[in-house]
Image (cartoon, rainbow, N blue to C red):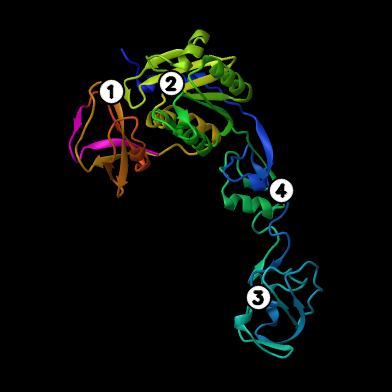
Amino acid sequence: MKGTVDEHADLVRSLITLPTTTETIPLADALGRVTAAAVLSPVDLPLYRNSQMDGYAVYAADLPGTLPVAAEIPARPGEPAALTPGTAAKIMTGAPMPDGADAVVPVEDSTRHGDIVTIPKPSTPGAFVRERGSDLRRGDELLPAGRLLAPRHLAVLAAAGLATVEVRSRVRVGIITTGAELVAEVTRVGEIFDANAVALVAAVTAVGATVSLGARVSDDAEAMSAALDAAIAVSDVVITSGGISMGDYEVVREVLEPLGASVTTLAMQPGGPQATAVVRGVPVICLPGNPVSTQLSFEIFLAPILREHAGLPAAVRQTRTLVAAVKSVDGKRQFLRGRAVGDAEVQVVSGASSHLVAGLAASDLLVDIPAEITALTKGTTVETWAL
Protein backbone atom coordinates (compact mmCIF):
# COMPACT_ATOMS: atom_id res chain seq x y z
CA MET A 1 0.00 0.00 0.00
CA LYS A 2 1.31 3.42 -0.94
CA GLY A 3 1.91 6.00 1.75
CA THR A 4 -0.24 9.07 2.10
CA VAL A 5 0.65 12.74 1.76
CA ASP A 6 -0.15 13.41 5.40
CA GLU A 7 1.99 10.50 6.63
CA HIS A 8 4.97 11.70 4.62
CA ALA A 9 4.47 15.29 5.78
CA ASP A 10 4.57 14.06 9.38
CA LEU A 11 7.74 12.06 8.65
CA VAL A 12 9.51 15.04 7.11
CA ARG A 13 8.55 17.25 10.04
CA SER A 14 9.80 14.64 12.53
CA LEU A 15 13.20 14.55 10.85
CA ILE A 16 13.81 18.29 10.72
CA THR A 17 15.05 19.97 13.88
CA LEU A 18 15.88 23.55 13.02
CA PRO A 19 18.30 25.88 14.84
CA THR A 20 17.02 28.45 17.32
CA THR A 21 20.05 30.71 17.12
CA THR A 22 19.92 34.44 16.55
CA GLU A 23 22.11 37.06 14.92
CA THR A 24 22.41 40.82 15.03
CA ILE A 25 22.33 42.46 11.61
CA PRO A 26 22.27 45.99 10.16
CA LEU A 27 18.84 47.47 9.48
CA ALA A 28 19.78 47.63 5.80
CA ASP A 29 19.77 43.83 5.73
CA ALA A 30 16.76 43.26 7.99
CA LEU A 31 13.80 43.54 5.61
CA GLY A 32 11.84 40.30 5.70
CA ARG A 33 13.65 38.98 8.77
CA VAL A 34 11.97 38.18 12.10
CA THR A 35 12.80 39.77 15.44
CA ALA A 36 14.32 37.33 17.90
CA ALA A 37 13.33 39.32 20.99
CA ALA A 38 11.28 42.35 21.89
CA VAL A 39 13.01 45.59 20.91
CA LEU A 40 12.79 48.38 23.52
CA SER A 41 13.20 52.03 22.69
CA PRO A 42 16.47 53.51 23.98
CA VAL A 43 15.02 57.04 23.72
CA ASP A 44 11.85 59.09 23.99
CA LEU A 45 10.03 59.62 20.71
CA PRO A 46 9.81 62.41 19.73
CA LEU A 47 13.23 63.23 21.11
CA TYR A 48 12.19 66.78 22.01
CA ARG A 49 9.15 69.10 21.93
CA ASN A 50 8.65 70.21 18.36
CA SER A 51 6.20 71.87 16.06
CA GLN A 52 3.61 69.87 14.18
CA MET A 53 3.06 72.65 11.65
CA ASP A 54 4.71 75.51 9.82
CA GLY A 55 3.43 78.52 11.74
CA TYR A 56 4.04 80.57 14.89
CA ALA A 57 5.04 79.41 18.35
CA VAL A 58 3.10 81.44 20.92
CA TYR A 59 1.69 81.62 24.40
CA ALA A 60 -1.93 80.47 24.04
CA ALA A 61 -2.96 83.04 26.66
CA ASP A 62 -1.85 85.86 24.31
CA LEU A 63 -4.45 84.96 21.67
CA PRO A 64 -6.28 86.30 19.85
CA GLY A 65 -3.96 89.22 19.23
CA THR A 66 -1.30 90.98 17.22
CA LEU A 67 2.23 90.03 18.22
CA PRO A 68 5.75 91.02 17.24
CA VAL A 69 7.75 88.21 15.61
CA ALA A 70 10.74 87.89 17.88
CA ALA A 71 12.57 84.99 16.18
CA GLU A 72 12.56 82.41 13.42
CA ILE A 73 13.18 78.76 14.24
CA PRO A 74 14.11 76.49 11.32
CA ALA A 75 14.12 72.69 11.55
CA ARG A 76 17.86 72.54 12.18
CA PRO A 77 20.09 71.42 15.04
CA GLY A 78 20.33 73.84 17.92
CA GLU A 79 18.20 74.90 20.88
CA PRO A 80 16.16 78.05 20.31
CA ALA A 81 16.05 80.91 22.78
CA ALA A 82 13.14 81.04 25.20
CA LEU A 83 10.08 82.92 23.96
CA THR A 84 9.07 86.09 25.79
CA PRO A 85 5.36 86.39 26.62
CA GLY A 86 3.53 88.70 24.27
CA THR A 87 5.69 87.70 21.28
CA ALA A 88 5.66 84.99 18.60
CA ALA A 89 8.36 82.96 16.89
CA LYS A 90 8.02 81.79 13.32
CA ILE A 91 8.63 78.04 13.40
CA MET A 92 8.95 75.23 10.85
CA THR A 93 7.50 71.73 11.05
CA GLY A 94 9.71 69.56 13.24
CA ALA A 95 11.68 72.45 14.69
CA PRO A 96 12.24 72.44 18.48
CA MET A 97 9.77 74.50 20.49
CA PRO A 98 11.20 77.45 22.41
CA ASP A 99 10.84 77.33 26.18
CA GLY A 100 7.71 79.11 27.33
CA ALA A 101 5.73 78.66 24.12
CA ASP A 102 2.84 76.27 24.63
CA ALA A 103 1.05 76.33 21.25
CA VAL A 104 1.63 76.62 17.52
CA VAL A 105 -0.68 78.54 15.20
CA PRO A 106 -0.58 77.29 11.59
CA VAL A 107 0.67 79.89 9.14
CA GLU A 108 -2.61 79.76 7.22
CA ASP A 109 -4.46 80.92 10.36
CA SER A 110 -2.40 84.11 10.62
CA THR A 111 -1.67 87.31 8.73
CA ARG A 112 1.77 88.85 8.74
CA HIS A 113 2.87 92.36 7.90
CA GLY A 114 6.59 92.91 8.31
CA ASP A 115 7.61 91.87 11.81
CA ILE A 116 4.04 91.78 13.12
CA VAL A 117 1.71 88.77 12.96
CA THR A 118 -2.03 88.96 13.58
CA ILE A 119 -3.78 85.86 14.90
CA PRO A 120 -7.54 86.42 15.03
CA LYS A 121 -8.61 83.22 16.74
CA PRO A 122 -7.86 81.80 20.21
CA SER A 123 -5.70 78.76 20.77
CA THR A 124 -5.22 76.24 23.54
CA PRO A 125 -2.08 74.96 25.27
CA GLY A 126 -0.65 72.01 23.38
CA ALA A 127 -2.20 72.89 20.04
CA PHE A 128 -0.03 71.57 17.20
CA VAL A 129 2.80 70.73 19.61
CA ARG A 130 4.45 67.32 19.62
CA GLU A 131 5.48 66.65 23.19
CA ARG A 132 8.63 64.72 23.96
CA GLY A 133 7.79 61.04 24.43
CA SER A 134 4.22 61.43 23.18
CA ASP A 135 4.78 58.57 20.73
CA LEU A 136 6.94 56.31 22.90
CA ARG A 137 8.81 56.62 26.16
CA ARG A 138 12.28 55.28 26.70
CA GLY A 139 11.98 51.59 27.62
CA ASP A 140 8.66 51.12 25.83
CA GLU A 141 8.39 48.25 23.36
CA LEU A 142 9.14 49.29 19.80
CA LEU A 143 8.53 45.85 18.31
CA PRO A 144 7.59 42.49 19.84
CA ALA A 145 9.50 39.27 19.39
CA GLY A 146 8.45 37.36 16.29
CA ARG A 147 7.68 40.43 14.17
CA LEU A 148 8.23 39.98 10.45
CA LEU A 149 10.08 43.15 9.55
CA ALA A 150 8.46 45.38 6.93
CA PRO A 151 9.65 48.86 5.89
CA ARG A 152 7.48 50.55 8.55
CA HIS A 153 9.16 48.50 11.28
CA LEU A 154 12.64 49.40 10.08
CA ALA A 155 11.55 53.04 10.09
CA VAL A 156 10.64 53.01 13.79
CA LEU A 157 13.91 51.27 14.67
CA ALA A 158 15.88 53.88 12.75
CA ALA A 159 13.84 56.71 14.30
CA ALA A 160 14.86 55.43 17.73
CA GLY A 161 18.52 55.56 16.72
CA LEU A 162 19.02 51.81 16.33
CA ALA A 163 21.39 50.70 13.58
CA THR A 164 21.06 46.94 14.15
CA VAL A 165 18.41 44.44 15.22
CA GLU A 166 18.55 40.92 16.64
CA VAL A 167 16.77 38.47 14.35
CA ARG A 168 16.25 34.74 14.07
CA SER A 169 19.01 33.01 12.15
CA ARG A 170 17.96 31.70 8.78
CA VAL A 171 17.83 27.98 8.13
CA ARG A 172 20.68 26.92 5.86
CA VAL A 173 19.46 24.74 3.02
CA GLY A 174 21.71 22.83 0.65
CA ILE A 175 20.29 22.05 -2.80
CA ILE A 176 21.48 19.25 -5.08
CA THR A 177 19.82 18.71 -8.45
CA THR A 178 20.64 15.47 -10.24
CA GLY A 179 20.52 14.02 -13.74
CA ALA A 180 22.90 13.60 -16.66
CA GLU A 181 20.36 15.38 -18.84
CA LEU A 182 20.52 18.63 -16.86
CA VAL A 183 22.66 21.29 -18.53
CA ALA A 184 23.11 25.04 -18.55
CA GLU A 185 23.01 25.13 -22.36
CA VAL A 186 21.13 22.62 -24.51
CA THR A 187 23.15 21.47 -27.54
CA ARG A 188 21.68 18.05 -28.38
CA VAL A 189 18.64 15.87 -28.03
CA GLY A 190 18.25 14.42 -24.55
CA GLU A 191 19.49 17.51 -22.73
CA ILE A 192 17.21 19.82 -20.76
CA PHE A 193 17.66 23.03 -18.83
CA ASP A 194 17.94 22.66 -15.07
CA ALA A 195 14.72 24.42 -13.99
CA ASN A 196 14.82 22.76 -10.57
CA ALA A 197 18.01 24.53 -9.48
CA VAL A 198 16.51 27.96 -10.13
CA ALA A 199 13.09 27.07 -8.73
CA LEU A 200 14.39 25.54 -5.51
CA VAL A 201 16.73 28.43 -4.78
CA ALA A 202 13.82 30.82 -5.25
CA ALA A 203 11.47 28.65 -3.18
CA VAL A 204 13.94 28.38 -0.30
CA THR A 205 14.55 32.12 -0.31
CA ALA A 206 10.83 32.90 -0.46
CA VAL A 207 10.15 31.00 2.78
CA GLY A 208 12.80 32.83 4.75
CA ALA A 209 15.68 30.36 4.54
CA THR A 210 19.06 30.79 2.86
CA VAL A 211 20.81 28.60 0.30
CA SER A 212 24.04 27.36 1.82
CA LEU A 213 25.16 25.36 -1.23
CA GLY A 214 23.83 24.70 -4.70
CA ALA A 215 25.16 21.83 -6.81
CA ARG A 216 24.20 20.02 -10.00
CA VAL A 217 25.47 16.46 -10.43
CA SER A 218 25.20 13.89 -13.17
CA ASP A 219 24.24 10.24 -12.67
CA ASP A 220 27.53 9.58 -10.97
CA ALA A 221 27.64 8.18 -7.44
CA GLU A 222 31.07 9.60 -6.66
CA ALA A 223 30.02 13.11 -7.69
CA MET A 224 26.78 12.76 -5.76
CA SER A 225 28.63 11.63 -2.64
CA ALA A 226 31.00 14.57 -2.88
CA ALA A 227 28.15 17.05 -3.32
CA LEU A 228 26.28 15.51 -0.40
CA ASP A 229 29.34 15.75 1.85
CA ALA A 230 29.82 19.40 0.92
CA ALA A 231 26.15 20.23 1.49
CA ILE A 232 25.95 18.46 4.85
CA ALA A 233 28.96 20.37 6.11
CA VAL A 234 27.26 23.75 5.68
CA SER A 235 23.52 23.02 5.93
CA ASP A 236 20.75 22.45 8.45
CA VAL A 237 18.69 20.67 5.78
CA VAL A 238 19.66 19.25 2.40
CA ILE A 239 17.22 18.96 -0.50
CA THR A 240 17.81 16.80 -3.55
CA SER A 241 15.76 16.55 -6.73
CA GLY A 242 15.64 13.52 -8.99
CA GLY A 243 17.35 10.15 -8.74
CA ILE A 244 14.82 8.35 -6.51
CA SER A 245 12.55 6.52 -8.96
CA MET A 246 12.44 2.76 -9.53
CA GLY A 247 14.47 2.70 -12.76
CA ASP A 248 18.19 2.58 -13.44
CA TYR A 249 20.65 5.44 -12.98
CA GLU A 250 18.92 6.64 -9.82
CA VAL A 251 21.98 8.21 -8.23
CA VAL A 252 20.34 9.55 -5.08
CA ARG A 253 19.02 6.10 -4.18
CA GLU A 254 22.38 4.57 -5.01
CA VAL A 255 24.18 6.86 -2.58
CA LEU A 256 21.61 7.23 0.18
CA GLU A 257 20.05 3.78 0.53
CA PRO A 258 23.28 2.31 1.95
CA LEU A 259 23.15 5.17 4.48
CA GLY A 260 19.67 4.18 5.64
CA ALA A 261 17.46 6.25 3.36
CA SER A 262 13.75 5.50 3.25
CA VAL A 263 12.51 5.51 -0.36
CA THR A 264 8.80 5.31 -1.01
CA THR A 265 6.04 6.05 -3.47
CA LEU A 266 3.13 8.13 -2.24
CA ALA A 267 -0.46 7.95 -3.37
CA MET A 268 -0.26 11.44 -4.86
CA GLN A 269 0.07 13.03 -8.28
CA PRO A 270 2.32 14.68 -9.16
CA GLY A 271 5.14 13.82 -6.78
CA GLY A 272 4.76 10.09 -6.11
CA PRO A 273 8.45 9.19 -5.56
CA GLN A 274 9.78 10.56 -2.27
CA ALA A 275 12.68 9.74 0.00
CA THR A 276 14.21 10.84 3.28
CA ALA A 277 17.46 10.22 5.11
CA VAL A 278 19.48 11.57 7.98
CA VAL A 279 23.20 11.73 7.24
CA ARG A 280 25.57 12.69 10.04
CA GLY A 281 22.68 14.35 11.85
CA VAL A 282 21.49 16.41 8.87
CA PRO A 283 18.08 15.59 7.36
CA VAL A 284 18.14 14.97 3.61
CA ILE A 285 14.76 15.42 1.92
CA CYS A 286 14.71 13.87 -1.54
CA LEU A 287 12.18 15.20 -4.04
CA PRO A 288 11.23 13.75 -7.42
CA GLY A 289 12.94 15.24 -10.45
CA ASN A 290 10.17 16.31 -12.80
CA PRO A 291 9.94 20.10 -12.41
CA VAL A 292 6.31 20.32 -11.35
CA SER A 293 6.72 17.37 -8.97
CA THR A 294 9.77 19.04 -7.44
CA GLN A 295 8.09 22.37 -6.88
CA LEU A 296 4.84 20.96 -5.56
CA SER A 297 6.65 18.54 -3.26
CA PHE A 298 8.60 21.45 -1.80
CA GLU A 299 5.40 23.44 -1.26
CA ILE A 300 3.62 20.53 0.39
CA PHE A 301 6.34 18.98 2.54
CA LEU A 302 9.01 21.60 3.21
CA ALA A 303 7.59 25.08 2.78
CA PRO A 304 5.24 24.86 5.81
CA ILE A 305 8.11 23.89 8.12
CA LEU A 306 10.49 26.57 6.84
CA ARG A 307 7.81 29.26 6.88
CA GLU A 308 6.93 28.44 10.45
CA HIS A 309 10.55 28.63 11.57
CA ALA A 310 11.08 31.92 9.75
CA GLY A 311 8.01 33.43 11.38
CA LEU A 312 6.23 33.82 8.06
CA PRO A 313 2.48 33.31 7.80
CA ALA A 314 1.33 29.93 6.52
CA ALA A 315 0.19 29.70 2.92
CA VAL A 316 -3.52 30.40 2.69
CA ARG A 317 -5.81 27.41 2.38
CA GLN A 318 -9.43 28.05 1.57
CA THR A 319 -12.41 26.39 -0.04
CA ARG A 320 -13.54 27.51 -3.49
CA THR A 321 -16.00 26.17 -6.04
CA LEU A 322 -15.00 24.75 -9.42
CA VAL A 323 -15.97 26.77 -12.49
CA ALA A 324 -15.85 23.57 -14.57
CA ALA A 325 -15.96 19.81 -13.99
CA VAL A 326 -12.69 17.92 -13.41
CA LYS A 327 -11.61 14.28 -13.41
CA SER A 328 -9.06 12.69 -11.12
CA VAL A 329 -7.12 9.44 -10.87
CA ASP A 330 -8.58 6.81 -8.55
CA GLY A 331 -6.41 6.08 -5.51
CA LYS A 332 -4.14 9.13 -5.84
CA ARG A 333 -4.48 12.46 -4.10
CA GLN A 334 -4.14 14.98 -6.90
CA PHE A 335 -2.87 18.51 -6.71
CA LEU A 336 -4.19 20.17 -9.82
CA ARG A 337 -2.98 23.60 -10.81
CA GLY A 338 -5.63 26.30 -10.70
CA ARG A 339 -6.26 30.01 -10.97
CA ALA A 340 -8.44 31.99 -8.60
CA VAL A 341 -11.60 33.39 -10.16
CA GLY A 342 -12.98 36.21 -8.04
CA ASP A 343 -13.18 35.60 -4.31
CA ALA A 344 -14.82 32.18 -4.30
CA GLU A 345 -14.14 30.17 -7.47
CA VAL A 346 -11.22 28.33 -9.06
CA GLN A 347 -10.42 27.39 -12.64
CA VAL A 348 -8.16 24.38 -13.26
CA VAL A 349 -5.54 25.55 -15.77
CA SER A 350 -3.33 22.51 -16.28
CA GLY A 351 -3.41 18.77 -16.64
CA ALA A 352 -2.04 16.43 -14.02
CA SER A 353 1.28 15.58 -15.68
CA SER A 354 4.46 16.51 -13.83
CA HIS A 355 6.22 18.12 -16.81
CA LEU A 356 3.65 20.88 -17.43
CA VAL A 357 5.69 23.81 -16.14
CA ALA A 358 3.77 26.38 -18.20
CA GLY A 359 0.55 25.30 -16.49
CA LEU A 360 2.18 25.71 -13.10
CA ALA A 361 3.40 29.18 -14.06
CA ALA A 362 -0.15 30.12 -15.09
CA SER A 363 -1.59 29.04 -11.73
CA ASP A 364 -1.78 30.68 -8.34
CA LEU A 365 -3.50 27.84 -6.46
CA LEU A 366 -3.27 24.10 -5.97
CA VAL A 367 -6.60 22.27 -6.12
CA ASP A 368 -6.50 19.41 -3.61
CA ILE A 369 -8.52 16.41 -4.84
CA PRO A 370 -8.78 13.52 -2.32
CA ALA A 371 -7.53 10.09 -3.40
CA GLU A 372 -10.99 8.51 -3.41
CA ILE A 373 -12.47 11.09 -5.79
CA THR A 374 -12.48 10.39 -9.52
CA ALA A 375 -14.74 13.18 -10.79
CA LEU A 376 -16.13 16.49 -9.57
CA THR A 377 -18.88 18.51 -11.17
CA LYS A 378 -19.00 22.24 -11.81
CA GLY A 379 -19.81 24.10 -8.60
CA THR A 380 -18.30 21.46 -6.30
CA THR A 381 -16.47 22.88 -3.30
CA VAL A 382 -12.75 22.02 -3.18
CA GLU A 383 -9.85 22.91 -0.93
CA THR A 384 -7.20 25.13 -2.47
CA TRP A 385 -3.65 25.96 -1.41
CA ALA A 386 -2.18 29.33 -2.33
CA LEU A 387 1.10 29.21 -4.25
Q: Which residues are magenta?
A: 374-387
Asked if the residue at tag 2 contacts the one at tag 3, i.e. Cβ–Cβ closer than 8 Å, the answer is no
Return the disc, 3 or 4, that comes first in the chain's sequence: 3
Q: Which residue is mark 2?
A: 10
At which x and y percent is residue 133? 69, 57
Amino acid type assigned to the residue bearing label 3 in the image: Asp
Q: Are marks 4 and 2 in contact (CB under 8 Å)?
A: no
Pointer 4 residue? 163
Q: Is residue 377 magenta?
A: yes
* Residue lying furthest bottom: 113
The quarter of the picture where residue 227 lies is top right
The local secondary structure at tag 4 comes to loop
- Do the numbered discs 4 and 1 sit on residues whose CB atoms are within 8 Å? no
In the foreground, 10 or 339? 339
Towards the viewer: 345 or 203: 203
Please identify, in this view, whether the residue under mark 3 or under mark 4 is nearer the observer: 4
Q: Secondary structure at mark 1?
A: loop
> CA gap, disc 3 to disc 2?
61 Å
Residue name at image x 57 percent, y 25 percent: 18
Cβ–Cβ below 8 Å for labels 3 and 4? no
Q: Quadrant of the N terminus?
A: top left
Q: Secondary structure at mark 2?
A: helix
Mark 2 or 1 closer to N-term?
A: 2
